[in-house]
Amino acid sequence: MITPFAASFILVLTKAFQQLNVMHKLYIPAFFTSFIIACGEIGVIVSGIQYGWAAVPYIGLGGGIGVILAMYSHDKVFKK
């Protein structure tokens, strides 16, 4: 079973990456990122159901690290 940290990390990383794809009008990466977002959303929902409020610190930490990594890595992947 996916952990709350990993689910949130994947979800927030891909949502932030997706936002940058949209801002830069990168159509193909934006399309494929949507499928990873769907997996992350399911993982966060399942983790919330399974662990309840105890998952909040792990979901928050995973999301925080995910958004920072997305901002950093998007510039590296799509060099201008």
Image (cartoon, rainbow, N blue to C red):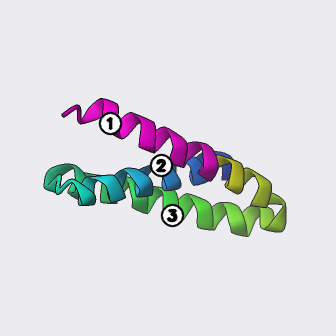
Residue on which disc 1 sits: 75
Residue on which disc 3 sits: 41
Residue 69 magenta-highlighted: yes
Amino acid beneath label 3? Glu
Which numbered disc flags the more N-terminal residue, 2 or 1? 2
Q: Which residues are magenta?
A: 63-80
Spatial distance from mark 2 to mark 3, Cα to Cα? 12 Å
Q: Quadrant of residue 38?
A: bottom left
Residue 78 magenta-highlighted: yes
Between 19 and 53, the residue placed more toward the observer is: 19
Q: Quadrant of residue 65?
A: top right
Which numbered disc flags the more N-terminal residue, 3 or 1? 3
Most extreme residue toward the front is 80
Residue on which disc 2 sits: 13
Let me know if residue 3 appears in the view.
no
What is the x, y in percent for residue 52? 79, 67
Nearest to viewer (mark 3 / mark 1) = 1
Residue at the (35%, 59%) spot, across then down: 19
Task: Check whether the beta carbons of the residues at disc 2 and disc 1 lie within 8 A of each other.
Answer: no
